[in-house]
Image: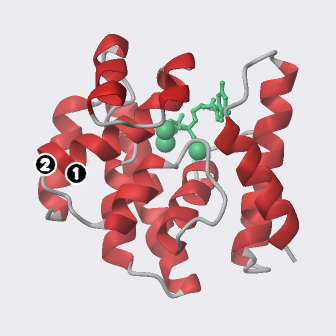
């Protein structure tokens, strides 16, 4: 898919603020692509599309999980966790975005997972550190990326912060979030 088409697609579908967030994630991902020698075009496209399904109807999302045999344990969660896998599936089967890297990058952007692909890692991090993000710990993650250039360490720290927040709020934890935490805890150095 061309960048222009992707931009138009989300401009029509997402509220203004979410559109602007998506553009910032794409631009952050392109910066990171230079640093970590990834394909900048793919990073941009995945960044633009990553929150495509953020406001899709929840019942509709559950139907995609069943129809496309996505991980059935997703059915225990709400749109927070479903919007990545559903957006990736829609892009692949309804919009002809065949690229595997982009599929995984969109699909895992919320939970992460063990052994992510390079572009998948970049989108996971870019979503957390795009310039308008102000959450606790974000400046340290920016430093880890842009000064120390340690991608796996950044993933570990992001997953750790996310888990801390979820536990504090008594939220259920998705298996892949924990698998991501454990895996990057091991490989972070
Ligand atoms: O879509 P965004 O707001 O840009 O960000 P996101 O897709 O990375 O995260 C959406 C939310 O999902 C965020 O508040 C954290 C939450 N989340 C991440 N992992 C888990 C989770 N929520 C639950 N319940 N369980 C998880 O494992
Ligand atoms: Fe998201
Ligand atoms: Fe995220
Ligand atoms: Fe996002």
Across the whole image, how many numbered discs are drawn on residues?
A: 2
Q: Is residue 183 left or right of residue 115?
A: right
Quadrant hosting residue 122: bottom right
- Residue 8 visible in the picture: yes
Q: Residue at x 76, y 43 (%)?
A: 178
Classify mark 2: helix, strand or loop. Answer: loop
Q: Percent from the top left, x then y, of residue 84? A: 43, 40
Q: In the picture, residue 43 is in which quadrant?
A: bottom left
Q: Extreme top residue here?
A: 59
Q: What is the secondary structure assignment of the residue under circle 1?
A: helix
* Image point (74%, 18%), residue name: 171
Judging depth in this view, the residue of 26 and 166 nearest the camera is: 166
| Separation of residues labelled 1 and 2 (CA atoms) | 6 Å
| Residue at 28% across, 17% down | 60
Residue 92's label in the rendered image is 1
Point out the image quarter for the C terminus: bottom right
Residue under circle 2? 95
On the image, the x and y values in percent for residue 70 come to 40, 37
Which residue is outermost to the bottom? 37
Residue in the image at 53% along x and 74% along y:
118
Kindly check if marks 1 and 2 are in contact, taking CB atoms under 8 A apart as contact. Answer: yes
Dot 2, crowdedness within 10 Å: few (<14), some or many (≥20)? few
Q: Nearer the viewer, residue 125 or 171?
A: 171
Look at the image and tell me whether residue 143 can be seen.
Answer: no
């Amino acid at each position: 898919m061309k960048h222009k088409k992707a931009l138009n697609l989300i401009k029509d579908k997402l509220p203004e603020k979410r559109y602007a967030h998506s553009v910032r994630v794409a631009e952050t991902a392109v910066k990171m692509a230079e640093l970590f020698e990834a394909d900048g075009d793919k990073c941009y496209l995945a960044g633009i599309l990553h929150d495509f399904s953020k406001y899709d109807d929840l019942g509709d999302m559950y139907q995609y999980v069943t129809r496309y045999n996505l991980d059935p344990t997703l059915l225990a969660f709400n749109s927070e966790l479903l919007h990545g896998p559903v957006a990736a599936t829609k892009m692949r089967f309804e919009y002809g975005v065949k690229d595997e890297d982009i599929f995984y990058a969109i699909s895992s952007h919320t939970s992460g997972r063990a052994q992510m692909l390079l572009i998948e890692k970049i989108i996971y991090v870019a979503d957390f550190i795009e310039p308008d993000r102000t959450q606790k710990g974000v400046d340290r993650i920016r430093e880890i990326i842009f000064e120390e250039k340690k991608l796996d360490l950044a993933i570990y720290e992001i997953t750790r912060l996310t888990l801390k927040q979820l536990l504090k709020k008594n939220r259920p934890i998705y298996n892949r979030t924990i698998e991501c935490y454990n895996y990057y805890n091991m490989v972070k150095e």
